[in-house]
Amino acid sequence: MKENILEIKDLVVHYETDEGCVRAVNNVSFSIGKKTILGLVGETGAGKTTTALSILNLVPNPPGVIKNGSIILNGVDVLTLPENKLQEVRGKDVAMIFQDPMTALNPVMTIGEQIAESIMLHGEKDKEKALARAKEMLEHVGIAASRSGDYPHQLSGGMRQRVVIAIALACNPRLLIADEPTTALDVTIQAQILELIKELNRKFDTSMLLITHDLGVVAEVCDEVAVMYAGRIVEWGTADEVFNHTLHPYTEGLFNSLPNLRKRGEDLVPIKGMMPDPMNLPEGCAFAPRCPYAVPQCEKEVPELIKRGTHLVACRAYEDGNFKLRRNSNG
Amino acid sequence: METVTAKSTNVQYKSRSLAAETWRRLRKNKGAVAGMVFIVILVIATIVSGFIYDYETDIIGQNISERFTPPGLKYPFGTDQVGRNIFTRIIYGARYSLTISVGAVAIGLVVGVLFGSIAGFYGGLVDDLIMRVNDVLYAIPNIMIAVVVVSLFGTSTFNLLLALSINAATSFARIARASVMTLRGEEYIEASYAIGLPQWKIILKHIVPNCLSPIIVQTTLLIGTTIIAASSLSFLGIGIPAPAPEWGAMLSEGRDYMRSAGYICVIPGLAIMVTVLALNLLGDGLRDALDPKLKK
């Protein structure tokens, strides 16, 4: 039994707006073990970022309200912590890498100061020492320490993302949340950053929650994968299980809509339809209206996560032991 | 690390801070440099004049025998209707304009930026409350407020300063609020929450420094307008009391001799005009220099 750094149970987050209630996250439960990289995959609007912000208890309020659930980080429930204790947790126990490195750095502070700021906030009182440590962190992410006096506008996008990573890792957090860390970068830089993230993950013994909609990134980096759809986890397993023994029809749809190197020239099969409006979710399985396997029963009740070894799936079809996705039966 | 692009070398990269970068670009703007030079000279002259001139004899001492001497070698700007040296009075008088305008703008800056940032940062009811009061004050002409304050509390430099600072505060509050509102949504502000920074530190260290550019520009421009306002009040006789050599008051006194000795009027007018022009040139230059879009 692995020790878990993060355990989320029955998390429900709603955005209560004038137009209605947006049910962004509905009963999400998952956990991340020590030194594990969990990939959280899903379309735009599936609730990935909201889940991540909940871990920091930073869901913008109003309109965001955490309705239910518990988030145990390092043995402490962050949802019940008072603000001053939360400030100690943020940055020290859990740190976040933001999506767009172009805007995630303060343009009027040197990068060295920005890394040192986080270090000084969590223990180090001496400014010189903090700056020295900041330089060390820069070296770790592959930027010469002599550039610590630079301002963000003097760096390229890839280098800025390295700085953002350095800030996140400066206090040795137990858990690192990376919210689409490579979306804003071009492909060659993406590969470098992913390599760096993997390497630092090993070096610093950090667990990681990697949020992405890029399955390639997941295959590259993650140990485990959780697939999210309309605010729910629909499939959760090791990367091998999810990629090679896909269980959920939605995950299958995602793979089918990707080009396959071995079957060049073949038409891509997109998932038909759109993700349901989170303000107006269907009564049953949220994927049922788009699901090629759906039966009338699917639209009546929300499927629970079913265990298949270590592999979890939320699909009613597995109540019948013989059910197989087309992708798997074709080999 | 194979993926590492930058090797740790001893090469010293040239890092320019925002201030250094602004200064470099400001120097290229001839108008701004001229304005700055003029203001520096004026400030030095004001400070020095306090030591070399005696207020009782050189500034307000009357010398009827030499009244209405036109500008010449002995009196560069001539003498006025009671024989006072206009040159020394202008130099000495700069202190009134400068202290009142700088003082009023400084008070306005602190008060305006404070309330503006609070309104912009918290939004909602607080924002409404602060900005509606601001709108009301903004709607009243600045001279009018000053007239009311001065007539209620009497004419003194401090009252004048206070009256003019209200106008400055309203402008600053608007600018600060607008900047803070755009900054509030920036990702680096969200990121500062994520590293556990308390709110007041985020405002002080991340938000305020980022809205300094428009505030600096507004400061220089407002000092100019405030000089005009202060002089107008003195011209109307409710500013600095006579016989102090306030530029507006000198202009007002010279009115009666406009036909016979026009320079008595023209010279203080020119002094006001050139000073405000210099400040505006500097303000425009700063605006261009601080504009990130021009960054090369």
Image (tube, helix red, strand yellow):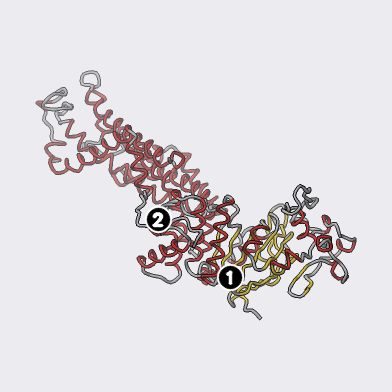
Visible in this render: residue B224? Answer: yes
State the SS at label 2. helix
Label 1 CA crowd tier, 10 Å (few <14, some 14–19, many 20+): many
Letter of the chain that mark 1 sits on in the rendering: A
The residue at the point 89 percent across, 64 percent down is A297
Co-location on one chain, circles 2 and 1: yes
Visible in this render: residue A82? Answer: no
Q: Earlier in the sequence, mark 2 or mark 1?
A: 2
Amino acid type assigned to the residue bearing label 2 in the image: Arg
Q: Which mark is residue A147?
A: 2
Q: Is residue A308 above or below residue B115?
A: below
Q: Is residue A102 above or below residue A177?
A: above
Viewer-nearest residue: B103 or B57: B103
Letter of the chain that mark 2 sits on in the rendering: A
Task: State the residue lying farthest toward the bottom.
Answer: A1
Q: Which mark is residue A314?
A: none
User: Can you give x and y, in whole percent of width and height, for residue A305 in the image?
Assistant: 77, 70
Q: Are marks 2 and 1 in contact (CB under 8 Å)?
A: no
Amino acid type assigned to the residue bearing label 1 in the image: Ser
Viewer-nearest residue: A69 or A1: A1
User: Can you give x and y, in whole percent of width and height, for residue B131 in the image?
Assistant: 51, 47
State how far apart marks 2 and 1 are (Cα).
29 Å
Q: Is residue B157 above or below residue A54?
A: above
User: Can you give x and y, in whole percent of width and height, for residue B54 in the image?
Assistant: 12, 41
Task: State the residue lying farthest toward the top.
Answer: B259
Residue under label 1: A207
State the SS at label 1. strand
B108 relative to B242 in the view: left or right? right
Viewer-nearest residue: B36 or A243: A243
